[in-house]
Image: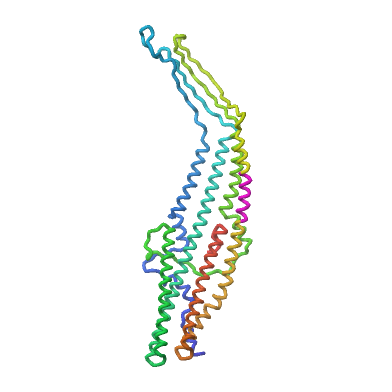
Amino acid sequence: MRRFIPLLCAAPALLVVLTAWPANGQQAGSASLTWDQVKTQFEAANPALKADALGVDEAHAQEITAHLRPNPQFTGSADGVQLTPNHGVWTPLSGVQTQANLSYLHERDHKRELRTEAAKDTTLVTADNHEDLKRNLEFNLRSAFVQTLQAKATVTLAKDDLEYYDKIIDISRNRFHAGDIAQVDLDRIELQRVQYEAELQSALVNLRTSKIQLLQMLNSRQPVDQFDVDGPFDFSRELKDLEQFRQMALDARPDLRAAVEQIEQSKVAHKLAIANGSTDPTFAGWWTYDGSYNNPNAVNAFGLSVNVPLRFFDRNQGEKKRTQIDIDRSQQTTDSTRAQVFSDVDSAYAQVDSDITLLKPYKDKYVAQSTRVRDTVTYAYQHGGATLVDFLNAQSDYRTVQLAYLQLIGTYLTAASQLNLAVGREVIQ
């Protein structure tokens, strides 16, 4: 086995490949974006997020409307215009009575203040709902970002496998010319190259598709070949306690904040419904000029009035009842949302913990072990110590382990994104 040591030491290991793949997989002239850069560009350009942000601005505008006082009412009138001549003289305006009336509705029981408070609560709920939409969209963005990183790693692995196998083919051809192997063995080895080519092309298509999906979410028209992303494609062995993630979720989840604020909004709406059941008087004052023939001296008159609706029947009873029920509904919704937060965190945490458990032996043992087995069997086959079937099986096992490792890392990163979604902020990069 000492003869195998130089070849084993020189063989490419997947761990080295994983740390080097961003530079190898990057297109010439492309601008690689980190996750923070992708997220910043997404927040600035995504049309769905921008459209929803306008809803928050609309809610702020409604606060202005809610705080406005009722407008005063002005009425002007003229009465007594003559339509026929008087003793042969037509003086249509000589007996006209003119009147100007100014009235104002006085709102009682702090209606305007309660409307303003209700509008502000609506703005808070709308803003938190916007943050919740952003939380969900960023999860989709992060998933697309992880898929792109995984596709890049898969392309690098496929290229390295094809390059490695081409060297085996060259060595096998030399052995065939030297008479060490038969034509059928060489043909079987060369035919196996088709599978490597197919895997590489499939990986390239997946990479391009992932980039297109990212560009769509970024609302970018940048050519795919000039677009690239970069970031760590690995996992962390450490995971905080579940209770820490639960507490962070209770503090950070915007949908839970919106549910809690909905309770306060419902309480204010109930107070406003009670206030709207009260009577609002209308105060009025008028000035009259009487130029009729009955009073040739023309009289200026001034008057005041108060109009008080008699609310014998409609005292806003239905709205009072509805808003009282809405308070209870909001409380139940909040309890349901809080339970959903715990469920989301617990499920995502279990998935991340499971992925870490699976990844540890892969990184510590299986990845390097599959490389050693492949290189050892390859060396033995080249020197007549292993059969062609052993060689092909070793190649297949190597690809299976390495690809499974990449897929597990992708699964872990997606689960980490799911945990970030459940918590409401990035707790795992």
Left or right, 310 with respect to 141, comes to: right
Residue 116 in picture, x, y percent from top left: 55, 39
Q: Residue at x 40, y 86 (%)?
A: 186
* Magenta stretch contains residue 327: yes
Q: Is residue 408 visible?
A: yes
Answer above or below: position of 299 versus 190: above
Residue situated furthest bottom in the rendering: 179
Please tell me whether the stretch drawn in magenta is mainly helix, strand or loop: helix
Asked whether 312 or 209 is in front, the reply is 312
Left or right, 332 with respect to 234, comes to: right
Answer above or below: position of 375 versus 31: below
Residue 264 in picture, x, y percent from top left: 60, 45
Q: Residue at x 50, y 43 (%)?
A: 60
Answer above or below: position of 81 versus 356: above
**Numbered-mark total:** 0
Asked whether 311 or 113 is in front, the reply is 311
Q: Residue at x 53, y 37 (%)?
A: 67
Residue 251 in picture, x, y percent from top left: 60, 55
Residue situated furthest front in the rendering: 184
Asked whether 87 or 54 is in front, the reply is 87
Residue situated furthest top in the rendering: 87
Q: Is residue 168 visible?
A: no
Bounds of the magenta span?
Answer: 326-339
Answer above or below: position of 162 versus 304: below
Q: Residue at x 42, y 59 (%)?
A: 216
Residue 58 in picture, x, y percent from top left: 48, 44
* Magenta stretch contains residue 380: no
